[in-house]
Image (cartoon, rainbow, N blue to C red):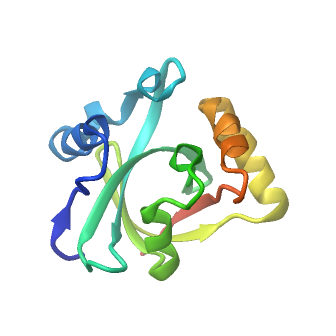
């Protein structure tokens, strides 16, 4: 991947989580979900996509669940009416990097559909209950469920 950046539009607590993931990934793996409106520690990974406009590497921490040898994340953007930039980047180029605690992977992203999406949504919603409220808020879009499959 290319030159790396943290978007200035991110809230400071997300930017701090990215920095912590880069300096101490084992510590950053568990995140206090109270910052996002839930409670308890949840597992996070660091997703790095290539910006579809900038061409730069852009990293974002995301709550995840394991799915066989893959990892599942939700493109909620807190229930905003549009998809998050990282998801749009994956639509343009599904090859990405993920860091799960101290393990780094090259991965390919795909959007889950149908029964698979329903099953994975329920799994992630059990980990982070605010996802259902986010879907209600995102009235004009179905929030994507993304499977990140390690390659190579």
| Percent position of residue 50, x then y | 33, 74
Relative horizontal placement of residue 45, taking residue 68 as reference (left or right): left
| Percent position of residue 111, x then y | 64, 67
Camera sees residue 151: no
Q: How many marks?
A: 0
Q: Is residue 116 above or below residue 40?
A: below
Relative horizontal placement of residue 3, taking residue 10 as reference (left or right): left
In which quarter of the view is residue 96 placed?
Answer: bottom left
Which image quarter is the N terminus in? bottom left
In which quarter of the view is residue 83 placed?
Answer: bottom right
Q: Nearer the viewer, residue 112 or 137?
A: 137
Identified at 35% across, 52% down, the residue is 60
| Percent position of residue 125, x then y | 67, 36
Identified at 45% across, 20% down, the residue is 34
Camera sees residue 15: yes
Please, which residue is most extreme toward the right here? Answer: 115
Identified at 31% across, 48% down, the residue is 10
Which image quarter is the C terminus in? bottom left
Relative horizontal placement of residue 137, taking residue 113 as reference (left or right): left
């Amino acid at each position: 991947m290319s030159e790396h950046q943290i978007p200035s539009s991110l809230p400071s607590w997300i930017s701090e989580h990215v920095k912590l993931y880069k300096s101490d990934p084992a510590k950053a793996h568990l995140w206090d979900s109270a910052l996002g409106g839930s409670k308890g520690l949840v597992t996070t990974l660091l997703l790095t996509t290539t910006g579809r406009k900038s061409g730069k590497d852009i990293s974002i921490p995301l709550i995840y669940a394991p799915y066989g040898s893959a990892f599942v994340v939700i493109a909620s953007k807190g229930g905003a009416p549009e998809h998050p930039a990282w998801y749009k980047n994956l639509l343009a180029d599904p090859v990405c990097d993920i860091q799960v605690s101290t393990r780094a992977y090259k991965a390919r992203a795909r959007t889950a559909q149908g029964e698979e999406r329903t099953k994975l949504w329920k799994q992630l919603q059990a980990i982070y209950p605010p996802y259902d409220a986010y879907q209600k808020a995102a009235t004009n879009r179905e929030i994507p469920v993304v499977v990140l499959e390690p390659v190579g």
